[in-house]
Image (cartoon, rainbow, N blue to C red):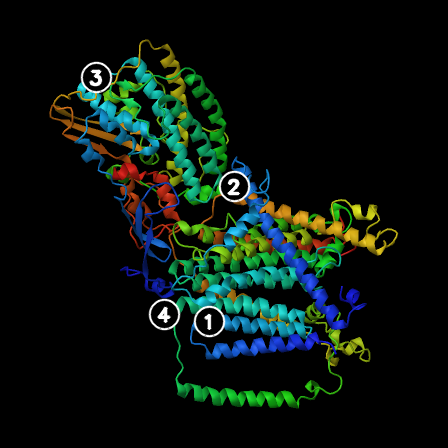
Amino acid sequence: MGVNFHSVFFHLMAVLASGFALAVVFSNNIVRMAFYLVASLGAVAGLFFLAGADFVAALQLMIYVGGTLVLLIFGVMLTARGPFADLKTSPAQWTVVGLVGGSLLAVLLYAASSASRWTASGKAASAPPDQVAPTSAPLGLALLGARVDKLDPKQNSASSRAGGMSGYLLPFEIVSVHLVVVLIGAAYLARARRRATPRPIAANSPPDDPSQSSSVS
Amino acid sequence: MADFFANWLPNWLALTLAALVHVTLILTLALTAAAAFTWAERKVAGRIQDRLGPTRVGGRFGWLQAVADGLKLVSKEDVVPKNADPLLFRAAPYVSFCASFCVYLAMPFANGWVAQPLDIAVFFILAVAGLEVLGVILGGYASGSKWSLFGAMREAAQVVSYEVPLALCAVIPVMVAGTMDLVAIGNMQSGWAWNWLIFHDPFLFATFFVYFTCAVASVNRAPFDLAEAESELVAGFLTEYSGFRWSVFFMAEYASMFAVSMLASILFLGGWNGPLPITVWLGLAPNPATGDAPHALLAYLGNFLGMVNLLTKATLGVLVMMWARWTLPRLRIDQVMTMCLKYCIPLAAAMFVGAMVYAYAFPAGLIFRVGGGG
Amino acid sequence: MAVEGVDPELAEFDVRTDEILVNMGPQHPSTHGVLRVVLRTDGEIVLDATPHIGYLHRCAEKIGENVSARQWIPYTDRMDYLAGMNMNLGWALCVEKLLKLEAPEKARHLRVIIVELNRIASHLVAAGTYGLDLGSFTPFMYAFREREKIYDLFELVCGARLTYSYITIGGAMADFPAGWLQRCERFLTEFEPVIDELHAVLTDNAIFIRRTAGIGVLPPEVAIDYGCTGPVLRGSGVDWDLRRDGDPWYTRMYDGYEFHVIAQTGGRYPIERPGHPVPAAAVLGDCWHRYYVRMLECVESMRLIRQGIEKYSRAPGGIGEPIKLTQKLPKGEVYLETEAPKGQMGFMIVSDGAAIPWRARARSSSFCNLSVLSELCRGCLIADVPAVLGSLDIVLGEIDR
């Protein structure tokens, strides 16, 4: 008998993820909700690590926890009325939420248990992968259009596009252009119109009035 | 290491023991480094200001001052402001601390000496280092004071903004090296100093300085420390923290400084490979010419020397940060943001394009080659 | 921000923030003293800055109506406590003018030496704490190290480091001890390279320039309107120094001395630093220029001290005797302003024939300099307020008396 660390950590991460998710739902304080969400998504990143998908896990940490949630917390903290905004959920709302959430959970559980590849059937992953498989190089190449993880020697290179070899080059480019558009839009929206330089000493300069401000250079 | 223990212990116990040893080593190193840096900070500050710094605790050089400070902080009264959110106020320093220390999980100290060998080490480090800002925001908010919140927001905005040029600068050596694995990047720079990536092309050389500047800004050190030093006017996010919690925040800050310095050393300055290939001469490392591999114990010694080498370089980086802090005045927050958006990001992008063009035009390098091929 | 006439497009895109009242002080990390400045800000921009003073009021002028003229000298020390000698001088000259008592020649030169030394000390505090306000810790240490040497000199002369009561009505309390002039010369030799160090760390430092150039621009007419004097006035380009242009009873102290008045006239300062031109970003009247005037005044003070030492050594006679403690003062009133390090410090005495003045009044230079704060801070960022305040170089002891 030994301790299967993979299972231990999986259960730990799963409990953390779902526990904090429940805390998000049941908490009354909006900032604490944001904090619990951070913890929950961090645990999900842990689940990704356990599944051997390092890159996706790091992406989860960087983009969700480090980016989206920081933004969320900014917004929450700056707009919460008073230091501790209280959100009370009425019993009626609880019932609706219970019904919708519960039915969704039931659907998900059914779908998960009926996926044949996910049921424990003899070839349970009891031994954790002790060698970390490189995850980023195939991903990078896939983004450039070469699906090296799906190389099928039976297909010859002439009809390579047909054997599932097409990469993600087009979506990659679309996303990049999309990001540029978003950045430009954000910069445009956030532009401030301020007076550029302080006025040098002039003979009869009028006193500064409050509607103009000095340089923000 | 787990295999080593598995010779005598059942597999799961071996894994636990290996993990514990790794964690202990990392924590000891990082915490000792943080404590040593508090001492060094005071000594460096004193010498720059034409005075001595601590000279009483622990002999002439006051090297036990850090321990004394730690004891003092631990024994202080635990003050939680009345308006503070009790859970978040207490949790915030530890969020920062954990984010800061998790960086060391993927950081190699020598060839193969890394707690968790990751293929995406650089990415992981950048991702985890960016989580430190959550502790700052939570701390500022949970202090229950308007000024702490604003200070925290300002600091968070600065850290998050500087993550962009930092990541861009870190990506450039990754691109030149072709891998995000820090062990591989370090091994690529073995040999003489001209194998270091910083000398690979002029763009990487400039990138090192841009990276260092962005690193200083992202750990909120002077001259970019307006948020934490603006206590003259608006309280920084640290105001309500005293005693042990404050020291946890500062451990996190020093650990981050050390971590970004270490990352710079590995990415640009050769990591554990010195300016001279001493370990090869002494027979402690595999000789690239003849392919001889040394005995296991000698290899261990060679790696140990490499680790000392890397820690020295990282410490030098931290000392430069301290030097800058005690010499330069502070930048205003809008000047900090201007510098990020108008100077660092375009520079980093230009360096990226330049390095790319250079690597395309001179794949074998013009004068210096990246050792081991790139 | 409820401002009429705002472009509606601007109003729509600007993130609206309520006006906040930020309270600065009365406890400060910097040594300006116990000053409370209430800022009304719109987000980061300051709309209004109102200084609240009075925290250091010690009824000095009321006490002046209850003690004799010579007994009031310690109270003048404690006004601008960073330049006690100058305060002593101001009051002593005022009473001497009332008494029509001329201090002997040797005392005149002694006074020049002492007063200019104290000017250097005061400007060192200004420069050092200015760096400290902006986050530069090191020049503070360098400046205070030099200030310690000046304090050692003063301690040898009168026994006190900060509150001297040395320059008195009729001369000075005691002559220089043996060897003091050599020590003073040695200090001046050691001090010259330190000025260059301070220039390197502050004046020419790119970050310092970014924090101070173009900030808090004070037009000369506004400066004159508000009664600003000293480096604040000269930093705006007004060529006015009481040591040259003031009351003859005071300017006669500087008879025979050669010195420049540090103000930018015709686009140039009287002292050029080769290789270090005035930065392009600096606008005349901004914080950088006010600070720069102080730095150059240190150099001029050194020149004056050297001339003073030489003249003192050649002057015959003694340094005079202080008047009797209970000397009756003639009826009359005299107002005399002197050029203190922080500006024009005026003392007024109204006497009705008794030994105790009927009214003793001090016109504080920092009081008027501070009054221009709200003008200067309007429209700047919150982080600029310490920069502006530091450049005005106020001391609350003088403002509140």
Chain letter for the residue marked with disc 4 in the picture: A
Please state which of the two labelled residues, at mark 3 or mark 2, is closer to the viewer: 3
Q: In the rendered structure, find residue A81 and report the number of the disc placed on it.
A: 4
Q: CA distance from mark 4 to mark 2?
A: 42 Å
Q: Are marks 2 and 1 in contact (CB under 8 Å)?
A: no
> Farthest residue in the front direction?
B75
Q: Which residue is more in the foreground, C296 or B298?
A: B298
Q: Are marks 1 and 4 in contact (CB under 8 Å)?
A: no
Residue A87 as seen in the image, left or right of residue B315: left
Element carrying mark 4: loop
Q: In the rendered structure, find residue C101 and report the number of the disc placed on it.
A: 3
Q: Compare marks 1 and 4 and give the one earlier in the sequence.
A: 1
Residue A152 as seen in the image, left or right of residue B154: right
Tell me the residue that label 1 is attached to: A32
Q: Which residue is more in the foreground, B40 or C71?
A: C71
Could you say where residue B166 lies in the image, as x and y percent from the top left? 59, 56
Element carrying mark 3: loop
Q: Amino acid at mark 3?
A: Leu
Q: CA distance from mark 2 to mark 1?
A: 40 Å
Give the residue displayed 51% in from the left and 57% down from the top. Answer: B244
Q: Quadrant of residue B58?
A: top right
Give the residue displayed 86% in from the left and 51% down from the top. Answer: B289
Q: Amino acid at mark 4?
A: Arg
Chain letter for the residue marked with disc 2 in the picture: B
Could you say where residue B285 lies in the image, as x and y percent from the top left? 81, 52
Does residue C336 lie above or below B121 as drawn? above
Tell me the residue that label 2 is attached to: B327
